[in-house]
Image: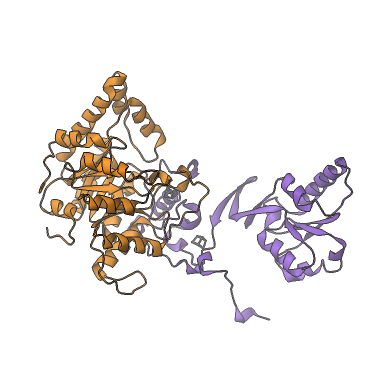
């Protein structure tokens, strides 16, 4: 999933400062799972904001709504009849959802209520970690199923570097060294000989370096 | 052994001598005089001088400019190049820049993470990694082509090296990792500073068991301790460094004013022991901001005068 984290409330207050009527818009997908922008977080943030502005003696209309997905035209359409009632939308979806909402409703400012962090997993409740940077050409088959792009601080394809210490990365003793994980995993797969195969120079044009990307699938196009 | 480049370092090794290299860190400003001073200390005692490339991710005068300066002073530079700060266009371009000034040695590195230095908020590039940079240099030299395939007019002639850390983890892949660097094109290796000689010798045995010492010249890396404090710092704070307790103790047992002398002694004794290890082809002395001690170390290890000097 895409992992996000709510922005500090002070920053959110600054974003909506000049608006009287604000819709806080959650999303039922990734941001719900990572507890940053689902229905529950929308409600908690809305009451915190109402409380804040009340204490400041400011009149503000803060409303709540959570769509099934903000990265989907169909669900965004549901806002069509109501959108003009708001001075702005504070979206708690990921960066993609925030933008898609803004693209749909040109005349309404849409502000980010979260910082979108990474594509990752829930290791345990309250602890999410990165797993993929969408490089566009997956190499997991060669690396024992562990991603060197997102999990090695230097995205080395022929690691580990000289800084790997007791299984941890040179940049942080709390962080697993991706290449230690790769080697351990190759060992348990009985594939350690694969370690000696030189990884070829990567074609980064499938990554962000090639410019904004798209996927076209004629077979499913309507 | 026949040589493939005009490198003096390559020739010394091919002629069967122990090679001696050292390193100079460029200044944090534009005063090349600092490099001149360091070069003067070492010039008659080493075969080549590495110039570090923004080491520990602290911004400094560029390695290439310092290498040109050393070359113009009559020294033999080794251009260190990290993949952290440049993409493949810039790497190949700088290699050509060095070749244009007849710099004949290069050391290919990935570089410390930028979070260690003065630009923790900057991006890192790592378009290539150190092994892929080795392949790039060898391709430019041996095939005379860019990575993109086009022909290079007057290709670089560079003796191509890499670093190895026998002490980093996991230890079991330290020998396979060297084999990989050799396969990628490394012709010489400069190792991480060696304080744990037993472990280094164990690694060298693994190297010999695979015959790698016959394919690549291994220069054992050494850094003399100036003080017990430095020994403790290297032990505890520098990732991938292995400083045994008895070495720290040996430094700490000396009164403060005697510690520098003891550090030099340890370093010389290490070189003497390592000279006997089959497969060690020379020494890389990294006397960090203590370059004036290099002659004493080289002489103490019985490595002076240098061949052809
Ligand atoms: S190799 Fe690329 S696509 Fe595969 S997990 Fe890593 S970043 Fe994602
Ligand atoms: S220590 Fe491991 S994860 Fe960290 S940069 Fe080096 S190889 Fe990558």
Answer with the quarter of the image where residue A102 lies: bottom right
How many marks on residues?
Answer: 0
Q: Residue at x 27, y 33 (%)?
A: B224
Question: Closest to the observer: B28 or B126?
Answer: B28
Q: Residue at x 28, y 66 (%)?
A: B139
Q: How is the image coloured?
A: by chain
Q: Is residue A12 left or right of residue B200?
A: right
Question: Closest to the observer: A79 or B180?
Answer: A79
Q: Vertically, is A60 above or below A200?
A: above
User: What is the x, y in percent for residue A159?
Assistant: 39, 53
User: What is the x, y in percent for residue A184?
Assistant: 41, 50
Q: Is residue A86 left or right of residue B251?
A: right
**Is residue B214 among what the camera can see?**
no
Colour in which chain A is shown? purple
Chain letter, colour orange in render: B
Answer with the quarter of the image where residue B197 lies: top left
Q: Vertically, is B290 above or below B203?
A: above
User: What is the x, y in percent for residue A222?
Assistant: 68, 81
User: What is the x, y in percent for residue A47?
Assistant: 83, 46
Answer with the quarter of the image where residue A39 lies: bottom right
Q: Residue at x 66, y 60 (%)?
A: A95
């Amino acid at each position: 999933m895409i992992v996000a984290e709510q922005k500090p409330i002070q920053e959110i207050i600054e974003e909506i400062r000049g608006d009287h009527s604000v819709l806080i818009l959650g999303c039922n997908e990734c941001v719900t799972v990572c507890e940053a922008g689902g229905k529950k977080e929308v409600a908690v943030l809305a009451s915190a904001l109402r409380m804040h502005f009340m204490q400041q003696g400011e009149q503000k209309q803060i409303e709540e709504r959570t769509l099934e997905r903000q990265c989907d035209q169909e669900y965004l359409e549901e806002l069509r009849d109501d959108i003009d009632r708001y001075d702005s939308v504070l979206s708690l979806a990921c960066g993609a959802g925030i933008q898609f909402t803004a693209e749909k409703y040109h005349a309404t400012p849409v502000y980010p209520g979260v910082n979108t962090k990474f594509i990752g997993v829930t290791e345990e409740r309250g602890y999410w970690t990165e797993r993929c940077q969408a490089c566009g050409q997956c190499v997991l088959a060669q690396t024992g199923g562990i991603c060197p792009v997102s999990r090695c601080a230097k995205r080395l394809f022929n690691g580990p570097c000289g800084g790997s210490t007791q299984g941890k990365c040179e940049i942080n003793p709390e962080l697993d060294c991706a290449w230690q994980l790769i080697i351990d995993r190759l060992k348990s797969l009985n594939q350690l000989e694969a370690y000696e195969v030189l990884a070829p120079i990567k074609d980064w044009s499938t990554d962000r370096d090639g410019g904004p990307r798209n996927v076209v699938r004629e077979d499913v196009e309507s | 052994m026949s040589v493939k480049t005009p490198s003096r370092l390559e020739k010394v090794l091919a002629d069967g001598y122990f090679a001696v290299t050292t390193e100079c860190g460029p200044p944090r400003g534009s005063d090349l005089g600092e490099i001149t001073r360091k070069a003067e200390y070492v010039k008659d005692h080493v075969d080549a001088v590495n110039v570090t490339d923004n080491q520990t991710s602290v911004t400094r005068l560029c390695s290439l400019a310092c290498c040109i300066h050393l070359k113009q002073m009559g020294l033999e530079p080794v251009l260190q190049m990290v993949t952290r700060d440049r993409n493949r266009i810039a790497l190949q371009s700088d290699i050509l820049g060095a070749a244009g000034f007849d710099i004949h040695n290069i050391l290919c590195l990935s570089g410390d993470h930028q979070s260690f230095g003065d630009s923790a908020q900057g991006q890192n590039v790592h378009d290539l990694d150190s092994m892929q940079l080795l392949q790039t240099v060898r391709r430019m030299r041996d095939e005379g082509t860019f990575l993109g395939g086009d022909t290079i007019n007057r290709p670089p002639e560079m003796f191509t090296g890499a670093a190895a850390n026998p002490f980093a983890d996991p230890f079991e892949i330290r020998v396979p990792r060297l084999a990989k660097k050799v396969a990628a094109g490394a012709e010489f290796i400069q190792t991480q500073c060696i304080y744990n000689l037993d472990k280094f010798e164990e690694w060298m045995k693994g190297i010999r068991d695979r015959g790698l010492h016959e394919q690549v010249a291994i220069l054992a890396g050494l850094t003399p301790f100036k003080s017990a404090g430095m020994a403790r710092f290297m032990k505890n704070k520098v990732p991938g460094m292995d400083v045994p307790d008895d070495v720290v103790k040996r430094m700490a047992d000396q009164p403060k004013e005697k510690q520098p002398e003891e550090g030099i002694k340890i370093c010389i004794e290490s070189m003497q022991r390592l000279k006997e290890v089959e497969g060690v082809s020379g020494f890389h002395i990294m006397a960090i901001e203590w370059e004036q001690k290099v002659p004493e170390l080289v002489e103490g290890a019985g490595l002076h005068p240098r061949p052809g000097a």
